[in-house]
Image: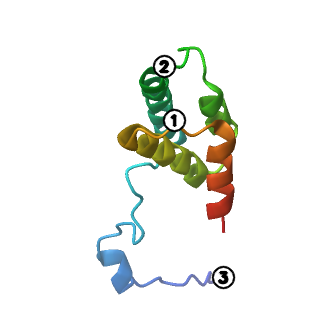
Amino acid sequence: MYIYSKMKRKRATEEKDQTDPHPRNQFYDKEELLLSCTQLQLEYNRLFGIDYNYVDILKYAQAQTQLDVIGKIAIILSACIKENIFKSLDEIKQIIESTRV
């Protein structure tokens, strides 16, 4: 009795470097994004004289499941700090909703 087995040939793509064709930007992990949001939330509170225990923006970020939304929150907080512009949680939510696809 003969058992037939196919021989697989090596493809040219297997020999090449298998790097990711779509490299992720600096935020690729939810934990890293949330850590960044935590730091930004504390800096935001200091800048605008808000109590240190105000973490509503951070709680909103933690409730999100999509990394791009968490990244947008971090970008908005960073821009608010850099430009010294206060945005409430509702305004941040509106900005994120307006940029969703």
Question: Residue 90, how many percent across, how many down?
Answer: 69, 42
Is residue 29 in view from this perspective? Answer: no
Which residue is pictured at 67% across the width and 47% down the height?
93
**Disc on the earlier residue, 1 or 2:** 1
**Would you name the residue on which mark 3 appears?**
1
User: Closer to the observer: label 2 or label 3?
Assistant: 2
Query: Residue at the location (65% across, 28% down)?
Result: 56
Question: For the residue marked with disc 1, what is the amino acid?
Answer: Glu
What residue is at 61 percent from the left and 24 percent from the top?
A: 55
How far is mark 1 from mark 2, CA to CA? Answer: 27 Å
Say which element carries label 3.
loop
- Residue 97: % across, % down: 69, 57
Residue 73 appears in the picture as rendered: yes
Q: Earlier in the sequence, mark 2 or mark 3?
A: 3
Q: Position of residue 37 (x, y in %)?
A: 50, 34
Please tell me whether mark 1 sits on a helix, a strand or a loop.
helix
Going by the numbered disc 2, the residue's amino acid type is Gly
Crowd band around label 3 with a 10 angstrom C-alpha radius: few (<14), some (14–19), many (20+): few
Q: Which mark is residue 49?
A: 2
The reply to whether dot 1 and dot 2 touch (C-beta < 8 Å) is no
Q: Residue at x 70, y 37 (%)?
A: 63
Q: For the residue labelled by badge 2, is the local secondary structure a helix, a strand or a loop?
A: loop
**Residue 2 horizontal side relative to residue 45, left or right:** right
Question: Of the numbered discs in the image, which one, if any, rests on residue 31?
Answer: 1
